[in-house]
Image: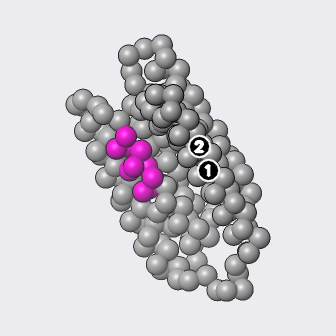
Amino acid sequence: MTELPRRQAGLTALYLGVFAAIWFSVPKADPPLRSLLVVGSVGALLAAAVGAVLVARAGRRPAGERDRAADRCYGLIVAAEVAVGLIGALLLAAAGLTGYLPVLVCAVVGVHFLPLAPVLRDRLLVPLGVAVTLVALAGLAVDLVSGVSAGLVVGTGAGALLLAYAVLALFRARRVA
């Protein structure tokens, strides 16, 4: 398993833990799944809290360690993600297909991990991105052929994947001697 610098591992756990908790809040579910989603949200927020502690303990990154080109690429990727998501959401809303918004957002999030992998120097973001994108496609397929909503599949699946990766990031944190 490849290690991550403590600060990066903490930030990964913090961000993905928060987003996992958000995804777990998307589905409207009956018990017992509702209880599992709440447990998942609490677990995700705990992973985020541990990530925040790692970031705080790692301290600020020295100015000389900043990679301005990587920062710029990161910003462009996130801006493109937001733009595609917003345009897609507007088109779905205009077509009266708002039930598919979670599918769109999940697909955009999944795809955005692919170009982020080299920027963040974390090759494991590629399988995460593929898995999240497949969850979006599964949500769409299940919604189209059954009575199960896309939001239930996508919220549960994306939340579980992001939580798992947040916890993995904590285990990958490089020990400082």
Q: Position of residue 49 (x, y in %)?
A: 38, 65
Q: Position of residue 85 (x, y in %)?
A: 57, 45
Asked if the magenta segment contains residue 51, the reply would be no
For this view, does 42 lie left or right of residue 101?
left
The residue that label 2 is drawn on is 87
Asked if the magenta segment contains residue 24, the reply would be yes
Depth order, front residue of 88/75: 88
Residue occupying the point 69% across, 69% down: 71
The magenta-colored residue range is 17-26
Residue occupying the point 47% across, 28% down: 97
- State the quadrant of the C terminus: bottom right
Can I make out residue 131 in this image?
A: no
Depth order, front residue of 27/65: 27
Can I make out residue 67 in this image?
A: yes
Picture layout, residue 112 above or below residue 56: above
Q: Residue furthest left?
A: 31
**Residue 134 numbered tag:** none
The residue that label 1 is drawn on is 83
User: Amino acid type of disc 1?
Assistant: Ala
Q: Position of residue 61 (x, y in %)?
A: 61, 82
Q: Are marks 1 and 2 in contact (CB under 8 Å)?
A: yes
- State the quadrant of the N terminus: bottom right
User: Amino acid type of disc 2?
Assistant: Ile
Residue occupying the point 54% across, 61% down: 12
For this view, does 95 lie left or right of residue 128?
left
Spatial separation of the CA atoms under disc 1 and disc 2: 6 Å
Q: Position of residue 4 (x, y in %)?
A: 62, 65
